[in-house]
Image: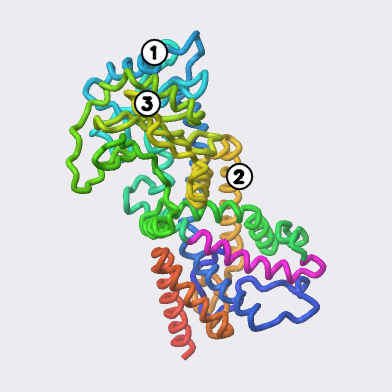
């Protein structure tokens, strides 16, 4: 990702021309190949100027976010882990002990200890907390004694340290305005990366006797100075390319504007995440495990106190285990008399499925079942992608891979700045010039069959990913102003 900065109008040369030693013996096909190359170069150039700083910030915070689950486990060890000591107490006894410490809060759910050295989480709705936050009391499953409490966030139950890192990565703790930075970075990352792929492919193809695909991943060590930086910039970019494309795609699902369009697209294509139905047979309206009410003209059942159903949780847990919910799970308590308990597997390191069942606490009957195998294929891919982005798909190895990719992306960006620094003019008749721009008129010189799809594709992407569209329009305006300025100076 080239990060050459603003442009000297008298230096409009291709930013990355191959050296004489890299020229092919045969003449390349000019129109299509050179047109695509020129378009990719100019797009890569402007994105490097204006977007690479945002991507760099996202990469630095993302490196910290990648290892946040492990940091959380170390920092909050006293809350998360206990020493095994005898048989485990009944789950209802553990929940009652937690409820006694929070008499003013409404019981929401319980997450039984997933392992022999883990604590049980009893979750409460706390009106003083923010969106997606709950109060958790951590209970020693062997003694049924609370060991502490904390605020947890989201479906993964992140503790304050991981939540703080998450928000740093998402919005720099600036709230909704700050989310524009991460959406801009995620939205442009795949565009810049694919444009860089076109440029790097062209450069590797110009190497005499070194134009096989394997050289895409191997820098030319014979180069020195700026050429060496270019080669490492491209080869490291190739190594991290598949992962950063996945990170870019999953990151956009969390964004404000592109995320809304992605959600609407998934809904239209029936790719949304399904939910188990907790309405008991004969209930007036369907109720889902999220606890939301569906208003359809029927009278709503009166509210019930979830704490009155604690005695039923032991049977519910056993039934869920016997019906395929075999991994770490969260049991949501009913809030209406005509509701069943929802038992759903949690997002945990090494968890690849999210099976769920609804269990009638009174009879122990399974009233609904949702196996992960029955999810739509794209919903599965989305779930796996999000868990990978969060460093939870396959545990510590997932986190280390993400950390390595973020470090690699940072080096690609830094080498982009280094390439600009070594290419900058040191003397200029018109004062200080910050760098050379790629050759102008790439779109005008491109063949019609390439130019028309490029314009239509840019318009479609700009509509679906609004921040890309707006910033791309800004790039065009700046490019036109630079051209006008150059002509006025020449006149």
Residue depicted at 48% across the width and 77% down the height? 455
Magenta residues span 188-211
Coordinates of residue 40 in the picture (x, y in percent): 57, 71
Q: CA distance from mark 1 to mark 3?
A: 13 Å
Instruction: Quickly name the residue at label 1.
Output: 144
Instruction: Quickly name the residue at label 2.
Output: 404
> Coloured how?
rainbow
Horizontal side of 433 relative to 478 (left or right) equals right
Instruction: Quickly name the residue at label 3.
Output: 110
Q: CA distance from mark 3 to mark 2?
A: 35 Å
Of mark 2 and mark 1, the one earlier in the sequence is 1
- Magenta stretch: residue 52 in it? no
Q: Is residue 5 visible?
A: yes
Question: Which type of secondary structure does the marked residue at label 2 adopt?
Answer: helix
Coordinates of residue 404 in the picture (x, y in percent): 60, 44
Tell me the crowding category of disc 1: few under 14, some 14 to 19, or many 20 or more residues within 10 angstroms, Cα based: many
Coordinates of residue 261 in the picture (x, y in percent): 39, 60
Instruction: Give the vertical position of 375 relative to 183 (above or below).
Output: above
Question: Which type of secondary structure does the marked residue at label 1 adopt?
Answer: loop
Q: Is residue 440 visible?
A: no
- Magenta stretch: residue 205 in it? yes
């Amino acid at each position: 990702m080239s990060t050459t900065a603003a442009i000297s109008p008298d230096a409009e040369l291709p930013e990355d021309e191959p050296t004489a030693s890299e020229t092919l013996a045969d003449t390349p096909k000019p129109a299509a190949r050179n047109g695509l190359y020129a378009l990719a170069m100019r797009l890569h150039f402007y994105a490097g100027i204006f977007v690479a700083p945002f991507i760099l910030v996202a990469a630095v915070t993302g490196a910290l976010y990648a290892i946040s689950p492990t940091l959380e486990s170390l920092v909050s060890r006293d809350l998360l882990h206990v020493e095994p000591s005898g048989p485990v107490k009944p789950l209802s006894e553990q929940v009652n002990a937690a409820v006694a410490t929070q008499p003013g809060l409404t019981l929401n759910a319980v997450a039984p200890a997933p392992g022999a050295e883990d604590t049980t989480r009893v979750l409460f709705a706390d009106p003083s907390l923010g969106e997606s936050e709950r109060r958790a009391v951590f209970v020693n499953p062997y003694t049924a004694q609370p060991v502490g409490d904390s605020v947890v966030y989201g479906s993964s139950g992140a503790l304050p340290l991981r939540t703080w890192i998450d928000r740093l990565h998402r919005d720099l703790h600036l709230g909704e305005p700050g989310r524009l930075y991460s959406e801009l970075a995620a939205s442009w990352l795949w565009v810049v990366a694919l444009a860089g792929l076109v440029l790097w492919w062209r450069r590797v193809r110009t190497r005499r006797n070194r134009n096989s695909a394997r050289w895409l991943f191997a820098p030319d060590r014979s180069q020195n100075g700026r050429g060496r930086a270019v080669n490492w910039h491209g080869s490291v970019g190739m190594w991290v390319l598949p992962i950063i494309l996945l990170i870019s795609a999953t990151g956009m699902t969390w964004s404000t504007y592109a995320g809304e369009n992605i959600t609407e697209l998934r809904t239209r294509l029936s790719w949304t995440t399904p939910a188990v139905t907790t309405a008991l047979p004969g209930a007036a309206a369907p109720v889902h495990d999220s606890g939301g009410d569906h208003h359809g003209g029927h009278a709503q059942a009166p509210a019930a106190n979830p704490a009155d159903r604690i005695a039923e949780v032991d049977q519910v847990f056993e039934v869920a285990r016997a019906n395929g919910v075999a991994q770490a799970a969260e049991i949501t308590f009913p809030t209406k008399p005509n509701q069943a308990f929802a038992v759903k597997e949690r997002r945990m390191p090494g968890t690849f499925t999210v099976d769920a069942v609804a269990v009638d606490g009174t009879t122990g009957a399974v009233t609904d079942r949702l196996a992960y195998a029955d999810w739509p294929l794209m919903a599965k891919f989305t779930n796996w992608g999000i868990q990978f982005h969060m460093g939870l798909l396959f545990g510590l190895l997932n986190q280390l891979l993400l950390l390595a990719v973020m470090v690699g992306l940072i080096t690609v960006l830094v080498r982009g700045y280094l390439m600009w620094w070594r290419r900058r003019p040191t003397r200029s008749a018109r004062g200080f010039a910050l760098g050379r721009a790629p050759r102008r008129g790439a779109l005008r010189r491109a063949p019609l069959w390439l130019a028309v799809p490029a314009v239509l594709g840019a318009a479609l992407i700009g509509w679906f990913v609004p921040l890309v569209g707006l910033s791309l329009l800004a790039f065009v305006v700046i490019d036109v102003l630079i051209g006008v300025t150059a002509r006025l100076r020449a006149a």
